[in-house]
Image (spheres, grey):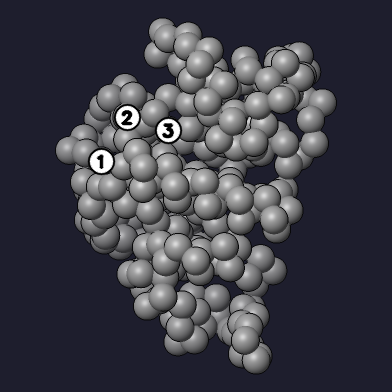
Amino acid sequence: MIMMNHVSAGYGNRIVIEDITISLEHPFFAVIAGPNGAGKSTMLKVLLGIVKRKSGSVSVFGIDPEVDKKSIRRIVSYMPQSSTINLDIPLRVKEVVAMPLRIMGEDDESLVREALEIVGAEKYENEIFSRLSGGLRQRVLLARALVKNAKLILLDEPLSHIDSKGRGEIFSTLHRIHEEKGVSFLIVGHDLSVCALYDPYLILLNRRIVAHGRFSEIVKPKYLAEAYGSILLGEGFVVMGEEHG
């Protein structure tokens, strides 16, 4: 249901992703990984129509996101890498989570509460968002992405600022939502360790797609070395030549 065919895109004259061809059948649970500057965030923005293609074609549930952004926003939810919320405005947590619903002309407090419960932040619903810790803010922003029950959820580094235990809990929750509700997830992430238990579809990206397939098939030295530049193999662990590896 998602197809990218020979897609290149970037900013100005700078090409960030090049000749991307991939198709993912709904419902899928997929992770995009690669070094800094690999084009992971840009790939998500192309699927949303935020970044225009320089070549190639894109279809998201049969829709070209550059042509029909309104329809894309109704069926796709997006959590960007950095929040655009003005921290000078004293918004309560529940108001932040409700933003996508209000944009669509809806206002369902039960959906807001359910989304906060999913990420373990329900007791903070009346707190001021700007006063929360970085980890709690990240959970609230994740709840905002989950609240409108989209068919496809794009998450750009949703586990950043969250401790290792919390990352495992949230990744497990996202996988459960995928299985129980048939929601597709495309997640940009650096921490590949949280993936091991769930064997998601993995896309290794470094401007071009290096490899893609089940996690267990793709996390191999030859693919990791090609994506990250260098790796160090130890007894039971792998260190990749990139700061977040």
Residue 155 lies, with reference to residue 242, above or below; the image says: above
The answer to whether residue 156 is left or right of residue 92 is left
Q: Is residue 189 above or below residue 66?
A: below
Within 10 Å of disc 2 (Cα), the crowding (few <14, some 14-19, many 20+) is some
In the image, 88 versus 6, the foreground residue is 88
Q: Alpha carbon of mark 3 to alpha carbon of mark 1: how far? A: 12 Å
Q: Secondary structure at mark 2?
A: helix
**Residue 195 to residue 58: above or below:** below
Q: Please identify the quarter of the rendering in which residue 230 is found.
A: bottom right
**Callout 1–callout 2 Cβ contact below 8 Å:** yes
Residue 99, numbered circle:
none
Q: Residues within 10 Å of mark 1 (few under 14, many from 20)?
A: some
Q: Nearer the viewer, residue 55 or 139?
A: 139
Read off the residue under disc 1: 60
**Among the two numbered marks 1 and 2 on one chain, the one whose residue lies closer to the N terminus:** 1
Q: Which mark is residue 75?
A: 2
Q: Locate residue 107, reporting x and y percent.
A: 48, 9
Q: Which mark is residue 77?
A: 3
Whichever of callouts 3 and 1 sits on the residue coming sooner in the sequence is 1
Residue type for callout 3: Ser
